[in-house]
Image (spheres, helix red, strand yellow):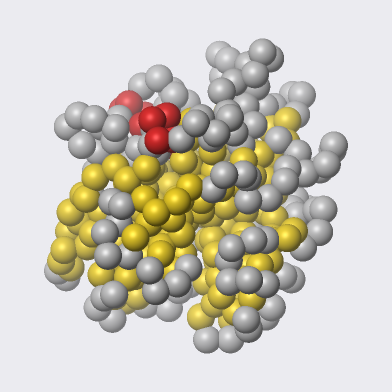
Amino acid sequence: MLVWKKLGKIFDPTTMNSSSWMQEYAQCPTPFLLNEEIVRVYISSRPKKGADSQRIAYPGYVDLSISDLSRIMSISEAPLLPLGERGAFDEFGMMPSSVVRSDGKVYLYYTGWTRMSSVPFTVGIGLAVSEDGGRTFSKMGKGPVLGLTLNEPYLTNSPIVQKIGTTWHMWYLTGTKWLPNAGAPEAVFQIVHAVSDDGIDWVRDGIPIVSTKSEDECQDLFAPFFHAGRWHAVFGYRKPIGFRSDPACAYRLGYASSVDLKNWTRDDSQVGITVSPSGWDSEMICSSQTFELDGRRLLFYCGNAFGREGFGVAELQDYSH
């Protein structure tokens, strides 16, 4: 099984930053090697709720020292990208979750969301490109690179993209239904897979690739990594209802492995990490991504309330078959 050692919470926007757009949340922490000194972690942050009690989410970043990940070098002073125009898929929120270097450019994939009437929101997957090594980005266009289709009619979000050989792979979430709830309806979504020759045009079928443990289980970011002769993925999962108030229904981390990147075997007993007895990640652990740094395998993740009080890091200590 995997064995992780938690290194602690790294960044908390509720205590470390006073920018009006970055008061709460550091969701989807996405690590990227900016240069030989800095790991840039792209995040999604929010101001306080408005008078209408609605949320807005902006993309930003936190720069960490490679020699000491607990040392914050800088924090973005302004949002990394502007929100979409009126009526666009990313009008009310942007959540970066994957960054890929290719042919001298850096591709940033993100979830864009907008508000709805019969359900709270809808989402799509956007793409922005950097020409300066990941410091600044420009959107490829006003629309999503992956949106809704005949077979994926509800949601497409939370992309993880990797270029393996000459093939681009994307693992993302697709919505399967909306469930009635005492408050607003809740979405159900599972992990699916797509491939591309250029990172822009994708071939997809919308078929879930990871088994579920319970009816209408919701799954989270799926970021495979190769270790000890196999592919591994640590991902979040939760119950579809009650997760906002009941920690027993909230996100935990699961595990799946594969030898071919197509067929995945789930065994959560192998994940090697769970919520803490107390503190910032005692009720929930989610939005996990792994990152290799100088031979170390690191896990970036969010804690309680979907990362309202920031993100932390764990380090892989061991793997046993």
Please state which of residues 49 and 35 is positioned toward the viewer in this rendering. Answer: 35
Give left or right: position of 267 versus 4. Answer: right
Q: Residue at x 63, y 51 (%)?
A: 80
Please state which of residues 62 and 49 is positioned toward the viewer in this rendering. Answer: 62
Which corner quadrant holds the N terminus? bottom left
Give left or right: position of 26 versus 206. Answer: left
Q: Position of residue 188 (x, y in %)?
A: 55, 38
Q: Give the total number of marks visible in the rendering.
A: 0
Please state which of residues 107 and 256 is positioned toward the viewer in this rendering. Answer: 107
Q: Position of residue 86 (x, y in %)?
A: 85, 37
Give left or right: position of 321 versus 118. Answer: left
Q: Residue at x 29, y 75 (%)?
A: 294
Q: Position of residue 222 (x, y in %)?
A: 45, 57
Q: Position of residue 128 (x, y in %)?
A: 69, 61
Instruction: Please say whether residue 154 is visible from this viewpoint.
Output: no
Please state which of residues 161 and 312 is positioned toward the viewer in this rendering. Answer: 312
Identify the image quadrant of residue 179: top right
Position of 20 relative to 272 (above/below): above
Give left or right: position of 230 versus 120. Answer: left
Q: Residue at x 75, y 39 (%)?
A: 91
Residue at the farthest bottom position: 165
Q: Residue at x 75, y 55 (%)?
A: 144
Position of 263 relative to 57 (above/below): below
Instruction: Please say whether residue 320 is visible from this viewpoint.
Output: yes
Which corner quadrant holds the C terminus? bottom left
